Image (spheres, grey):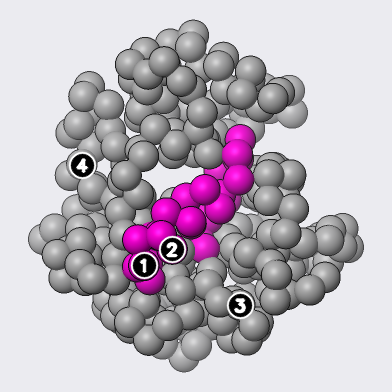
Amino acid sequence: MNVNSNEHFCTIFDSKFLPIGLTMARTLLEQCPNAVLWVMCLDQECHQYLQTLNIDGIRPVELSHVETNELLAVKQNRSRAEYAWTLTPFACDMVFELCPQALRATYLDADLAFFDSPTLLINQMQQAQKGVLITEHAFAPEYAHGIRYGRFCVQFMTFNREPQAIAIMKHWQSQVLDWCYARLDNNRFGDQMYLNDWPQKYESVVHILKQTHLTLAPWNVSHVAETRNEFDPVFYHFHGLQFVTSKNVRLYSGYRINDKISLLETRGKK
């Protein structure tokens, strides 16, 4: 595989999240055949399983390769989820270290599913001549209160390999090392609310995706389906998805989604 022509992505998950993470990987590789997905494996079982599968386009990375003394120092005081959030700002850095040819790297939440090529989103950043791409939650009116957890969603973020973009990434890393917890505290929440300041602080570098209907999730999918003539998402964020039993899956919780969600199935068959 010629790494010079590839689009590089990265994600983070453990062995318990393998079915979801592999579904994301499958849809990504289907929609973007030149993708390389670097997986930061949170446990050894996940790394070994991905190595055994040996899927073209997936590069598993052991957590020990990423963990610095600074990360290890905060690990013991954070929950598993909080530590995963702490690792997120280091994921694209991992790609740049392991693949010197990568011109940019895009972080993906492991519970996304792609219905179109993610390059449609990345190209918008490139056309705007910016170095960082972020996406809004774009809450439906009935879920507007969710903005207290952050205007932007750490679900799809692109960083170019250029000094200004990397400087933003490094500052974000220092912020989460200092504080990254699953609670609201002085305009902070996990790794996410740090992004609220970026549009003003880094206006010349950060691009906000304008077409919010391309990035769907339980908090906006019904609203988009009802208010738009076209239903053409690039991805759907399966936030809250859980395997209840071996035969039952909970697709979401805490939201009400109407039957127009079936349009996603239609979109997936095109």
Q: Amino acid at mark 4?
A: Ile
The x and y percentages for residue 132 are 37, 67
The answer to whether mark 1 and mark 2 are in CB contact below 8 A is yes
Name the residue at 37% across, 18% down. Answer: 228
Specify the label residue 147 is tagged with. Answer: 4
Which contiguous range is marked in magenta?
Answer: 106-133
Quadrant of res 103: bottom right
- Distance, label 3 to label 1, CA atoms, is 18 Å
Helix, strand or loop at mark 4: helix
Name the residue at 64% across, 58% down. Answer: 14
Local crowd size for mark 2, using a 10 Å CA cut-off: few (<14), some (14–19), many (≥20): some
In the displayed structure, 231 sits above or below 125; it is above
Quadrant for the C terminus, please.
Answer: top right
Identify residue for label 3: 102
Q: Nearer the viewer, mark 1 or mark 4?
A: 1
* Disc nearer the start of the sequence (3/1): 3
The x and y percentages for residue 153 are 35, 49
Specify the label residue 178 is tagged with. Answer: none
Specify the label residue 126 is tagged with. Answer: 2
* Disc nearer the start of the sequence (2/3): 3
- Distance, label 4 to label 2, CA atoms, is 27 Å
Task: Please indicate, yes or no, whether residue 238 appears anywhere in the rendered image.
Answer: yes
Name the residue at 51% across, 17% down. Answer: 261
Q: Nearer the viewer, residue 255 or 245?
A: 255
Identify residue for label 1: 129
